[in-house]
Image (cartoon, grey):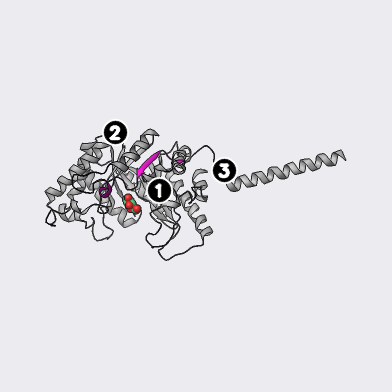
Amino acid sequence: MRQDAIGTRVLLTGVLILVITINAAAQQPYSSKGLKDYYQQYFPIGVAVSANQLKDSAQTALILQEFNSLTPENAMKMGPIHPEEGRYNWRDADLIVNFAQQHHLKIRGHNLCWHNQTPKWFFYDGNGKLVSKTVLLQRLKDHIYQVVGRYKGKIYAWDVVNEAVADDDSQLLRNSLWYQICGEDFIAKAFQYAHEADPDAILFYNDYNTEQPQKRERIYRLLKQLLADGVPINAVGLQAHWSLNKPSTENLIATIKKYASLGLQVQITELDISVFTSNDERIPAAAAEQRQAEQYQRVFEVFREFKKELTGVTFWNLSDRSSWLNNFPVPGRKNYPLLFDQSLKPKAAYWKVTQF
Ligand code: GLA
């Protein structure tokens, strides 16, 4: 009788332990470690944020648990920070910098010269005519001196020029107003001004589709020329707005190697992995989440392999709740490109990235 009772109890305890183990594995409860801790021996792990997100305690708790670097998603772009000539709007940028300093997070500045989100006044005079090259470069210099100067010593790296290379294979540089007015000189000048404003900051050229062989080659040509001309450029940012089928491991590795061969640091600056492979595709959610997790796993394997060349990996926002890919490029289409879901819970991809 007694033997039976003990046997039953042992059996029940065994079943209970099994159930708890299975349940724990399924839910993967948070450890006290965050991404930044798993990657401590590799590179800082950053996240792009808005000032408003830093007013939300659930989001700030997650940021502090997981990340050790911040990038202002929009607050330091020319439009938001310098909406009119001589008028700067420092509020949101200051809030992000103060938060980062208070919590000992690194800060990447983003960005100083771009064809998008730049106010029209930069390029036009009071009569609505395009300004001269001299005027535009003076405006660029004032802007960079003010913005970089204000955060000197607080921001360790700046995306100085963003997306200046053309998508069209027949041209090297994008036909932007910067290019139309200044020719190619605006690029070297932007780096020169940034270096003068903060000689210690690490200065980046930042772009997308850097893994596409033709665009990779054109960016490489530009970087090589800048270095040959003695321009103070230190690093290249791979934006990494990727998807379920891009980039291939081969192209990613070739890109990191190619830019690193110039002696430049490489960072992943705006990482997200869309759950779509094209604009008209709809993949069942469970399958997409699984493929996304595998793609995240693949690219992080490469990142770890190239830890000598890579000096940072930054995600382009915190969770699927607030990604720029919601509604873009397809209006009304929700995307799920990040490691945390809409309730800020880690997704399958999170565990693939942290368990190695
Ligand atoms: C580019 C810019 C970013 C951001 C994304 C889309 O990658 O560098 O600042 O605007 O586009 O949101």
Q: Name the residue under label 3.
A: 29
- Which one is earlier in the sequence, the residue at label 3 or at label 2? 3
Give left or right: position of 317 versus 344.
Answer: left
Q: Quadrant of the N terminus?
A: top right
Q: Nearer the viewer, residue 297 or 122?
A: 122
Tell me the tag on residue 212: none
Q: Give the amino acid type for the residue marked by disc 3 in the picture.
A: Pro
- Which one is earlier in the sequence, the residue at label 1 or at label 2? 2
Q: Where is residue 292 in the image (x, y as percent from the top left)?
A: 48, 54
- At x 46%, y 55%, the residue is 336
In the structure shown, which secondary structural element does the residue marked by tag 1 occupy? Answer: loop
Q: Name the residue under label 2.
A: 153
Q: Which picture quadrant has residue 105?
A: top left
The answer to whether residue 296 is visible is yes
Q: Does the magenta stretch include residue 288?
A: no
In the structure shown, which secondary structural element does the residue marked by tag 2 occupy? Answer: loop
Give left or right: position of 72 versus 244.
Answer: left
Tell me the tag on residue 317: 1
Q: How crowded is mark 3: few (under 14 residues within 10 Å), some or many (20 or more)?
A: few
Q: What stretch is highlighted in magenta?
A: 66-80
Give left or right: position of 7 versus 270.
Answer: right
Q: How crowded is mark 1: few (under 14 residues within 10 Å), some or many (20 or more)?
A: many
Q: Give the amino acid type for the residue marked by disc 2 in the picture.
A: Gly
In the structure shown, which secondary structural element does the residue marked by tag 3 occupy? Answer: loop
Q: Residues within 10 Å of mark 2 (few under 14, many from 20)?
A: few
Q: Nearer the viewer, residue 44 or 139?
A: 139
Q: Which picture quadrant has residue 4?
A: top right
- At x 18%, y 42%, the residue is 142
Q: Position of residue 111 (x, y in %)?
A: 28, 46
The answer to whether residue 309 is visible is no
Spatial CA distance of label 1 from label 3 is 22 Å
Spatial CA distance of label 3 from label 2 is 38 Å
